[in-house]
Structure formats: structure tokens, C-alpha cells
Image (cartoon, rainbow, N blue to C red):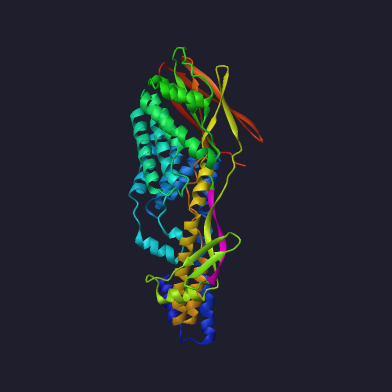
Amino acid sequence: MTTFFKSFHNTTGCHPKRRALRVDFLLLLACMTTLSGCATWYQRNIAFQTAVYNGELQKADKILDKESKQADGKNRILYYLNKGYVEFAMGNAEASNAAFETAERLTDDQLRNLAAEAAALLTNPEARPYRPEDFEVIMINFYKALNYLSLNDMEGALVEVRKINIKLNALNDRYPDHKNRYQRDAFAHLLMGLIYDASGDANNAFIAYRNAYETYQADYARNYGVEAPEQLKEDLMRTAHACGFTAELREYEQAFGRKYTPSTAPESGQLVFFWLNGMGPVKAEWSVNFLKQQRGDGAVVFYNQELGLTFPFFFGSGYSEDERNSIANLQMLRVAFPKYVERAPFFTRAALEINGSAYPLEMAEDINGIAFKTLNDRMVREFANSLLRVAAKKGVEYAAKKENEWLGLAVRIVNSLTEKADTRNWQTLPYSISYARVPLAPGENHFSIRLGGNGGTATRQFTAEGTAHRTQFQAFQTINCK
């Protein structure tokens, strides 16, 4: 792009007709160099997404291998997230954890890249290295924990849930003003409880279950419409009884409206079954026009009456003269922002049928709802940052126009073509996660999951080995979306 501007700058002495030809060539070149960037992240990766959607996991893996150059670029975290997911879906737990470990390390070590930030100001936010959403960071450890459980590595799974706890505490510290609704993850605490419970640590299981229940009550019911699962309530009372927490048990019995009765049946093993339903939302973009108002104190205000948004700009020492003049001469700004697009799942309910009994799978995590709320909570910051980006680009345009009219036109064209939102996100996450705990008979158990939705039903068969005093974990995903 530097050579492009330089060569155009040298045309100031051209004949008008030749200069017009240069402008036409400039328009064509600008369009060609930015056309590939107009598509959303989902559209640019449609081959991979289609393979995953169709259950062609080997094909999806080969597509990732062909695009391995992404492993060293600004989208490297997304590359390893997708690699970890595909290996998980294929049952390759160790390879999956290796990829997720890399994604986690890159996320933890991610530093503010000043060069990328400068590029983002002059182009768009996709110039920055991808930064996972907070809930995406937590989901890395969820998948890693499931992988360890499939390898019968309980200690490895416990390490992952402890890391989840550390990350959740960091989220709380990051948002002391409570402007983000996603500060606590009820499902993450529930997962911690399930794994502590399976390891025989009833005390830590009770603490995790209690934290999960409180988060469902305080956050999830209000923000996402997800109530505390009935199975969680039962496990909370059971572990309170096991730990001798009589007062707490009575408190929960009163809250739940039922008396806890310890089981007298012989312990023959249990199964915790996770249903990963559908696929989470993808990001697209939308644009908003802002009009300018001049305030009496010298500030410039950009506003959108339809959305009720107002953003004042105060010209401090950090603004150059060109930026001040460019903003002062603006009457309207068009700014691009990200938005989520829902991929509604085909199935909306499911139950396990085993040994003559049915156990409904209860929703524990609404990833789709969390994604929408998370983006909505930071939308004001998104608006403000995007306006700053457009203002900076207009400053460059103003400076170029002062030097040469055609150069200013070129910068305006490029600014318009590069004004787009960051549409990247982890697009192989499920729409939601539900679970059930079921008792197993000694020996081999054959059971099924019965799926239902507005369009029909389906059934899948599974087996699990019942072993006394042992809890097993299984996960199953339905990809189908409407």
C-alpha cells in the first residue's frame, strides 16, 4: 500500500487525461486489493464450515492442514481452536488437547501489538491478532477437561477445572463495574462440581455446585433465561448431606420445596452425559450512519437518533491538526460494527432412555445467548472505538487531500473499501450444552438419546459400562441447524 500511494503521488505533473487514467487504474487496484476482505470470516472459511456441518471431519481436518499458514498469522488462535475441536470430534483426545494447549498458551501470552493496533486504525479491526471472547476462553478448558476424562485422566481434568476457576476470578476482577453480564459462568462451576464429585472430593464438589446454583439464580435466569437444572439441585443436597452440612441442607430443602432422601440402592456406577446441541452463532457486520453536531464547548458530537446513540469528541493534545480539521469538516460518518447471526438448532429437546427410565437432558449453558449478550454489553465501546478509527482515517484523508487532490481521492476510496467490522469468532462451538446424570446397572448398559424438535425426531444408541463407585462421562453433539 505504501508503494501504491508513492507512485500515485508522483503523478501531480501528468496531463489531465493521463491523470484520469491513473485514477481509474487506482480505483480498480483498490477494489482488487480489498475485495477479498469484504467477505465475513464465515464466508472466507465456508469450505471448512460446510465440512464440519456435514460431519465430514476428515475433510475438515485436511482443509485445516492446507491452511496451516494461519497457524503463524494473526488468526493463529482461531486455527488452533478449530484444530482442537476437529480432533475432539474425531475422538483424538491427545491431539485435541495439544491444539487447545497451544490456543490457550497463545491466549494467555497475548500482548497488545502496537503495530497491529496502528494498522487497525488505518484499515479495520481484523488487522489485529484475534482475541477470543471471554466465554471462548473458558470453553477451551471445557474441551480439554472432556478430553482428559475420555483418557481416564481424572487429575488432568481437575487441573483444567482449577484453571477455569482462576480465569473466572480474573473475569470478576476485570469487570468491577458490572458492565459485562458475562462475569461468572454457571456451567463452568457445574463442570467443576461434577469432576470433583467423580473424584470423591465431596467438599469441593459442594462448593462448586453451590457457586453454580448461585450463578444460575443471580445471572443466568435473568440474562439468558436458563434456570438451575434440577439435577444440580439434587447434587447440591446430596453433597451437603455427605459433608455433614445440616444447616445448608435444610436451607436448600426449603428453597427447592422438597425433602432430601439419601439413596439406599447399591452403588453400581453413574454416567454424566453431555449433549452439545447445534452450532453457535457466527459474526457478520452492519453499518450505522452518524450525524455531526457542534457543541458550544468546542466538542464535536456524533449521534444516531434512531438508535439513541451519542458520542462526543473532545480535541485534546493527542489529535493532530489534520485530524481536527478532518473531523470539523465532516457532516456524516458511516461506521461498520460486528453483529452475531444465530444458527438455530434443529433439535430443541432430548432425553436419555436407559433401563426402562427416561432422564431429560437439561440445558446448562446457552452459548448462543451468552455470545449475543456479551457483544451487546460492549457495543458502546465498539461504537466509540470504531468512530475513533474512522476519525483517524479521515485525518489521513484530509492530509493527503491537502498535498494532492487525487491522492486525497485515492485515500477516500481505500478508506471506504476498508471500513469493515471484525467478523471473526470461534464458529465450531455448540449452540448450547445440556446434561443428565443417570444410574448404570452393573456390566454393559445399552441406552439411547431421543431427540426432538419442530421438524421431527431422531434416536441414537450408546453403551456404557457400569462399575461400582465410578462415574463415567460421555459427550455427544448434534450439528443440524435450521
Q: Is residue 197 above or below residue 277?
A: above
373 or 399, nearer to the observer: 373
Q: Is residue 357 above or below residue 54?
A: above
Residue drawn at x 47%, y 61% as measured from the top left = 384
Question: Magenta stretch: residue 290 in it?
Answer: yes
Q: Main secondary structure of the magenta part?
A: strand
Q: Quadrant of the C terminus?
A: top right
**Where is residue 156 shown, x and y percent of the image?**
34, 32
Q: Quadrant of the N terminus?
A: bottom left
Residue drawn at x 40%, y 38% as measured from the top left = 141
**Where is residue 47 shown, x and y percent of the image?**
53, 48
**Where is residue 144 shown, x and y percent of the image?**
39, 36
Q: Is residue 134 above or below residue 468?
A: below
Question: Magenta stretch: residue 316 in it?
Answer: no
Residue 195 in view, yes or no? no
Residue drawn at x 46%, y 40% as measured from the top left = 86
Q: Is residue 455 above or below residue 446?
A: below
The boundaries of the magenta stretch are: 282-293
Tell how many labels: 0
344 or 50, nearer to the observer: 344
Find the residue positioned furthest to the right: 455
**Where is residue 279 shown, x and y percent of the image?**
54, 42
289 or 6, nearer to the observer: 289
